[in-house]
Amino acid sequence: MYRLLLSVLVVGVAALQFRLWLGDGGMRDVWRLESAIEDQQADNAKLARRNAELAAEVEDLKEGNAAIEERARYDLGMIRKGEEFYLIVER
């Protein structure tokens, strides 16, 4: 009788441990979710930095001509009248 009761208790504890570590909502799922949260927070931080840069660029474009001129020079290769353009090619 004692062995039967002990066996039932051991099997019960083993079943509970299995559910704790490997079952739905167990520690495996908790670790996976924590990892997913960390990844998402890193992505959110990158996007927040990008949004701040874009907001600053929009503000520059609204405020003055310097940003527009810089864009025209960089994107379109424009130069002012009277300026000379030198292209330095590295070997």
Image (cartoon, rainbow, N blue to C red):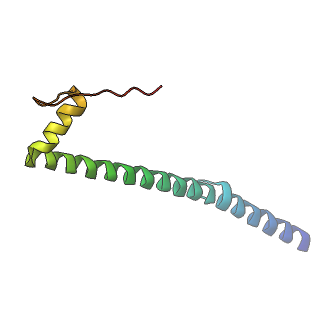
Give the residue at the far bottom of this rendering.
2
As displayed, is residue 34 above or below residue 89?
below
Q: Is residue 1 visible?
A: no
Based on the displayed image, in which of its 4 quarters is residue 12 positioned?
bottom right
Q: Is residue 63 above or below residue 80?
A: below
Residue 80 appears at what percent x and percent y? Answer: 12, 31
Residue drawn where x is 21% and y is 51% of the image: 56
The answer to whether 24 is drawn above or below residue 78 in the figure is below
Position of 32 compared to 75: left or right? right
Quadrant of the rendered image containing residue 76: top left
Q: Between 39 and 49, which is closer to the camera in this rendering?
A: 49
Q: Position of residue 79 (x, y in %)?
A: 16, 29
Left or right side of 77 for 50: right
At x 20% / y 32%, what residue is drawn? Answer: 73
Residue 77: x %, y % from top left? 22, 27
Position of residue 25 in the picture relative to residue 66 (left or right):
right
Q: Residue at x 56, y 58 (%)?
A: 30
Write down the quadrant of residue 7 in the picture: bottom right
Q: Nearer the viewer, residue 6 or 72?
A: 72
What residue appears at the point 31 percent right and 26 percent down from the top-left corner? 87
**Which one is in front, 49 or 28?**
49
